[in-house]
Amino acid sequence: MALYRDQGVVLRTHKLGEADRIITLFTAGHGRIRAVAKGIRRTKSRFGSRLEPMSWVNGQFYEGRNLDIVTQVETAHRFEHLRSDHERLHRAAVMLEAVEHTTQEGGPDRGIFNLLTGALRELDRTGNHSVLPAFVAKLLMLEGIQPQVDACVVCGRIEQIEAINLHQGGVLCSHHRSGQPIGPEVRRALSLVFAGEVRRMLDETSAGIADATEVLAMQLLEQHLERRLKSASVFRTAI
Ligand SMILES: [Zn+2]
């Protein structure tokens, strides 16, 4: 069996048998992998609590036919605030779920790894409300999606823009509306986010609009993935 080392972020875990867990990680060199951590649910497990969702670890793995096996693991980066702050925790959970459902197993993607780890660090450090919209915009752009936000994608009208639909390629006027409703202020904030001007978006946007932009970013993610994100439900109830 081949042995390899890699670093990765734990996306989720689930129980296997009596004492084991299957750990889903997004790694720098091997993309999304699943590996068994044997004996991890025993009180004296050598893995300790290092393989919880959101943990960023350096590990050593045996390559298996279906599932790899974790043989060693060390913490690569410790997040100080992600788990203790509810708001940050929910946002981080959305990011993990998005990466899990965007990526295929076994396809290395350094761009996504860098995006995820960068966004988690920023969220951990600042708790900033722009982190999630910026993450969603970059993830969509890595997937080749950049919605048109200045004019209706059907007729080119710039007045009475009322909705946004990623399957149509961007915003829609009152005649052609489908997808999610969008107001002018959120549309402007979103266009700044897609232009990479996240700092400016924060400076020029009220807290209420920043929050609405965040909710819309999650809805766009759900449109793209064609599924509802479990971890986004807390934001839906907050609207
Ligand atoms: Zn139109």
Image: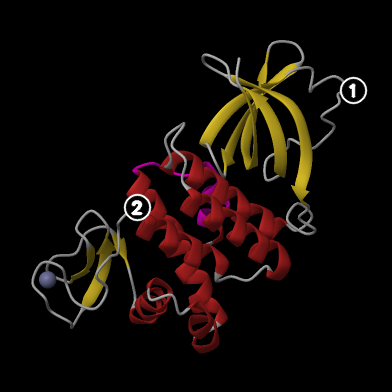
Horizontally, residue 75 falls left or right of residue 140, namely right
User: Disc 1 or disc 2, which is closer to the eye?
Assistant: 2
Residue at horizontal 55 percent and vertical 56 percent from the top: 114
Q: Which mark is residue 143?
A: 2
Nearest to N terminus: mark 1 or mark 2:
1
At label 1, the amino acid type is Thr
Q: Is mark 1 within 8 Å of ligand 1?
A: no
**Magenta span of residues:** 226-237
Residue at horizontal 52 percent and vertical 13 percent from the top: 65
Tell me the residue that label 1 is attached to: 43
Residue at horizontal 15 percent and vertical 68 percent from the top: 153
Relative to the observer, which residue lies in front, 65 or 117? 65
Dot 1, crowdedness within 10 Å: few (<14), some or many (≥20)? few
Provide residue 182's location: percent of width, then percent of height: 33, 70
Query: Magenta-highlighted stretch: main secondary structure?
Result: helix
Q: CA distance from mark 1 to mark 2?
A: 41 Å
Q: Which mark is residue 180?
A: none
Above or below, comparing residue 66 to residue 7 in the picture: above
Provide residue 178's location: percent of width, then percent of height: 21, 59
